[in-house]
Amino acid sequence: MLLAVETSGMTGSLAVFADGQIVAERMLESEGRRHAQTLVQETGQLLSFAGLEIEQLTAVAVSIGPGSFTGLRVGLVFAKTLSWLRGIPLLSVNTLQATAQQCSEQYSEVLSISDAQRGEVFGVVCRRDPDGRILRPVSEVQVFGVADLPAVTVVAGPVVEQHRGVLEQLPGRTLVALSPRAATVAVLGADQLQRGQTAVPELLEPLYVRPSYAEEKRAAAGG
């Protein structure tokens, strides 16, 4: 029984996965009010709704970014703590991969993007496994100008509508407006668990890709 945690953006979620399917999923409160204690409470409510006990959890998967600095940190602290307290494996899932994975199975290659602020986006290209089940990143997450994205014909993410005018300059491009969900984090986490790709809680950090604007300003000022 795997618990998945997705707190990378304004709308977070939790999901329980078992026997190859989602048992239950719950949307979370908005980012500004999220903290570790609310995740404890909402996990309890999710498990109760599904008729489960926390003792039945055998793994926890967490979305590690890129995304909101605060949201990612809260989700990761919660997942690490649960892994340590219950003695269960911890799985780390790339948030952009989770977004791509939600696309239709007809797409063999997807460029997944999310907001990097300053008019830029985080992006990674994912390609489907030969068995058609999982879309996997084929490169590292990078920061792109919207006009400088790879020429992939399917683009997915929560900011595609925001940048539609620029993205549609590539003829034949398909835009899929999606935000990452815990249900998909669960699927990818279960795949990692099956492959033995567990994370080391003491070493796992959020995938920020680059420092926050505040950190960059401090560095420029010599702070």
Image (cartoon, rainbow, N blue to C red):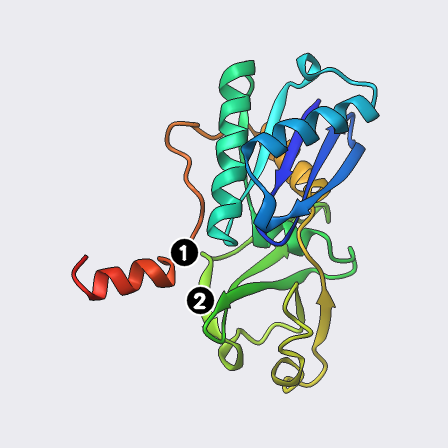
Q: Which mark is residue 209?
A: 1
Residue 45 lies in quadrant: top right
Residue that appears at 44% across and 48% down = 207
The location of residue 94, given as percent across then percent down, is: 54, 47
Q: Which mark is residue 4?
A: none
Q: CA distance from mark 1 to mark 2?
A: 8 Å
The location of residue 202, given as percent across then percent down, is: 38, 27
Q: Amino acid at mark 1?
A: Val
Q: Residues within 10 Å of mark 1 (few under 14, many from 20)?
A: some
The location of residue 189, given as percent across then percent down, is: 62, 35
Which part of the image, by quadrant, shows the N terminus?
top right
Which residue has dot 2 on it? 143
Q: Amino acid at mark 2?
A: Val
Residue in front for this viewpoint, 72 or 37: 37
Q: Is residue 19 above or below residue 143?
A: above
Residue that appears at 80% across and 33% down = 24
